[in-house]
Image (cartoon, coloured by chain):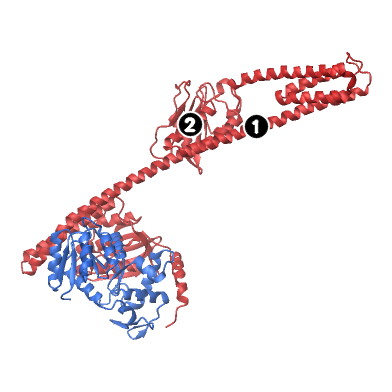
Chain colours: A blue, B red
Amino acid sequence: MAGDVVLVVDDEPQIRRVVRNVLAADEVRVLEASNGQQAIDLAAAERPALIVLDLGLPDIQGIAVCREIRSWSSAPIIVLSARHSDQEKVALLDAGADDYMTKPFSPGELQARVRAQLRRSRLAPAAGATQVITIGELVIDPVKPSLKKRDVGVHLTKTEWELLRTLLKHAGRTLTHQQLFRAVWGNSSGDMQQYLRVHVRSLRRKIETDPVRPRLIVTEPGVGYRFENEP
Amino acid sequence: MSDDRATSPRRGVRRREWVAWFAVLFAVTAAMVAIRAHINEAHVALAYLLVVQGGSARGGRPLGIALSAAAFLCFDVLFLPPYGTLTLQDPLNWIVLGGFLLTSILSAQLLYRAQSEAEIARDRAAEVDRLASLGAETLNVGRAEEALMAIASVIRASLRLDECALYMTSGTARPDPIVSRSRVARSDMTVDSRLVDWVAGEGRSVVERLDGTTERNWPIQQLSVASPTTNRARAFLRPLQVRERTVGVLRISNAAGLTLTPAQIRVLEALAYYAALGVERVRLVGEAQRAVALQEAHKAKDAVLASVSHDLRTPLTTIKALAHEIAQGGDDRAAVIEEEADRLNLFVAQMLDLSRIASGSAASNVHPNEAEDLLGAAAQQVSGRLHGRELRIEVASDEPLLFGRFDFAQTLRAVVNLIDNAAKYSPANAPIDLIARRDGRWLVFAVGDRGPGISSEQRERIFEPFYRRSESPDVGGVGLGLSIARGIAEAQGGTLELDHRDGGGSVFSLRVPAIPTAELEQAAGVLGERDDASNES
């Protein structure tokens, strides 16, 4: 983690200062940009390991910056926004952002998210989808495929496997309803919200210890679902 | 529709035709008399027949018949011996004469019929032409009101009325009628607006008579029936309908009396349909403009909300972060600053919620959602602030799937507000119950506590913004949680009610529309098809 380059984009110097202080503990090198164009230029020149991007930029819309950087970089992008809007959150995740924090955020929370994103990006990208994984009382072999809960085999339907594989592949990252639906069902038509919820529910029944209080497939209200591989 | 001004010249033309054709008859007769020795009856009959047919073709049936009669006499007197008398030498010649007369009258009659049919066809074609061009005009005119004016003018001019008025009655606002009035018309007639309202409401016609009386439910065909002077119609009102819905009222009037021919009634009916379409178009254009204005207003408000939230939350972020840093250095006062910053942030969020509810945009993301999913998300959100208190979650339903149609994030906010409220007003060790169940067409999220309960006087007041229960200790907050929760419930067609709970305490029931199980099983079945082919592991 030490020595990583992190780019902080915000037009407010005070917020940049806050983020810089949060990152100081991890001994990363912090680059700062105060507008969108500068952010894109710096990201291209310095290839940072992570980008913290504020949405209220004076020149370019934050979502456009996000999409632009994502088109040639796979560095995790954590978005900061003062608008508590689910639609905005969905749009950003669809544009390639990895995480989203609303202002005012707590410094401890930001630190935890930055660390999680850096750790995740360091892992092989598709590791979760090809290796046998043990999470709590679950043993998942996505290739075979087989699933054991407390050493007892659990049958998953084909749709449930595709849903689980998609979630595993992006473990720790929130997938929007749209992204999940596309990955599992392709471009089928229909009420995607309803299909998705029916199958998330049945998958939870099979893998969660207490499906009413899920710990693995976490709901991101109004946005989508996230697989927590380190609950 | 014949025109008075057009009639007199036509009469002049007709007189000239008569003179001309009798001259032709005279000339033909004179010519044939000159060569009488060389021609027989057949030549004479043929020549006269040609004159009769030419005459009836140019001058109509009366001229044809008059020419037939004259030719008959000339034939008899001048060409059938003995010449100069009506008597006939050879009785067989009566057959020749009779045949001639019959043939000439018949041909005049047939020609007349063919011609009048051609004329009707021409009239019809002109009528269709007029309607088509009017239709095109009404679609082309830039402003919808101008199109209506054009229609009113055409109706007035083509039926030669004093006045034609179009009333738009479908909206809540009643704009002024579009009135086309002839220059010579006396505009002293006052329109009874109650009659217009009645026609708009009932979708039936009304007649106003010259003597001032009115008759409702009056069929338009009556306009062509001649009636005594005092009983004649002065004005006629008919509904304008589009797809069996009354959108306006058409009023036509003639101060001197209103009588229409069946053809004119037909034209009026056709034009009235254009008028109805025109009125509907005015309404739709108005609606579209209002929608655009509303959208603009929403956009402006959203922009204000966005900038307010940005301008308030950005400094709060700094305050909170700096306080956090200082608190880590061991200063307790910094922790208070951080808490207060959080409180301020909550207040900002609640004010924005209230404004969103007030503007009707609180539930903009309504989808089929699952009850259990919401319970889990609620448990997760409040887990950090229940301080070890038990939250019991139950799905009280025998149905395999419990779905409702609601905005997930907003409903979650409402349920979390209810749980926070229960935690505030009940003993710290008392568990809180969160139950999802179906109640008929509703999906109910019930939050039950074992607090002191709420008196019936306060039962509605606690949903008012900024209301705080008098007997309760200071529990923090500003008293917006419950009114926001109710606003969210109502924004998606649901309700939020408070009841006494058996065994003490209160229970809040938030209702949102449920989705019928049959509909869900169908959805699950559609997607389950692929699972049949799954590799059993």
- Residue A5 position, x and y percent, is 18, 71
Q: Quadrant of residue B440?
A: bottom left
Q: Quadrant of residue B446?
A: bottom left
Identify the amino acid type marked 1.
Answer: Ile
- Residue A3 position, x and y percent, is 16, 75
List the residue tagged with mark 2. Answer: B152
Say which of marks 2 and 1 sits in front.
1
B452 relative position to B436: left or right: left
Q: Nearer the viewer, residue B367 or B210?
A: B367
A39 relative position to A71: left or right: left
- Residue A135 position, x and y percent, is 28, 81
User: In this orientation, does residue B446 appear?
Assistant: yes
- Residue B354 position, x and y percent, is 25, 53
List the residue tagged with mark 1. Answer: B120
Q: Secondary structure at mark 2?
A: helix
Identify the amino acid type marked 2.
Answer: Ala
Residue sticking out furthest to the right: B90
- Chain letter for mark 1, please: B
